[in-house]
Amino acid sequence: MDIPLHLHRWTRQPFDRTAAVVAGFTAGAVLMAVELLWSALTPGPTGPWHTPHLVAALLLGPDVLQEATPYGFDPGVVVAALFTHYVLGVAFGGVLALVATGFGFDRDPPAIAALGAVFGLALYGLNFHGMVHAFPWFAQLRGWPTGVAHVLFGATCAWFYQQLARRAETHR
């Protein structure tokens, strides 16, 4: 009796860069909305603008974090956080698209959804357990809500990439 394993092997394949950018940007917007909603719904001493301050500190430096809590709305901080967040979302969308296309997951909706979820979980690990050595303030965001949000980012990015790249192939 033969059991098909459907193993995927890496083959260098061109990926749809436009679909990757749109998928990463859209998934970044979903992640940001989930994070803002979560921080607004959970009572805490930091307020809903805490996470944008943490993200903006990547670009503006840790001095942004010296404000008194709760963190208030600051247009410069919000613009820096949005810029940083979306650039990273687009970059990670490109990495996910490269991997999904190279292993052929982009043609298999359940596989790309699983890949996206695992990718999001790996991003969570990288960002909040690996990069925390360079950016120690990110340790504050460790926990299941941030982990779930990153899994959602990966799954959303993968789904959008699969949908957009497929549509682009049919119009060529």
Image: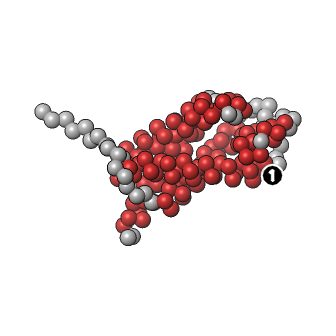
Q: Is residue 46 above or below residue 33?
A: above
Q: Nearer the viewer, residue 152 or 21?
A: 21
User: Is residue 108 among what the camera can see?
Assistant: no
**Residue at x-position 51% and y-position 44%:** 154
Q: Which residue is mark 1?
A: 76
In screen coordinates, is 93 left or right of 127? left
Residue 102 in picture, x, y percent from top left = 38, 50
Quarter of the image for residue 62 reads top right
Quarter of the image for residue 137 reads top right
The residue lying furthest to the right in this view is 68
**Residue at x-position 63% and y-position 52%:** 86
**Residue at x-position 68% and y-position 34%:** 134
Residue 90 in picture, x, y percent from top left = 57, 53
Name the kind of residue labelled 1 in the image.
Answer: Gly
Quarter of the figure that contains the N terminus: top left
Secondary element at image label 1: helix
Q: Nearer the viewer, residue 134 or 66?
A: 134
Residue 74 in picture, x, y percent from top left = 82, 48
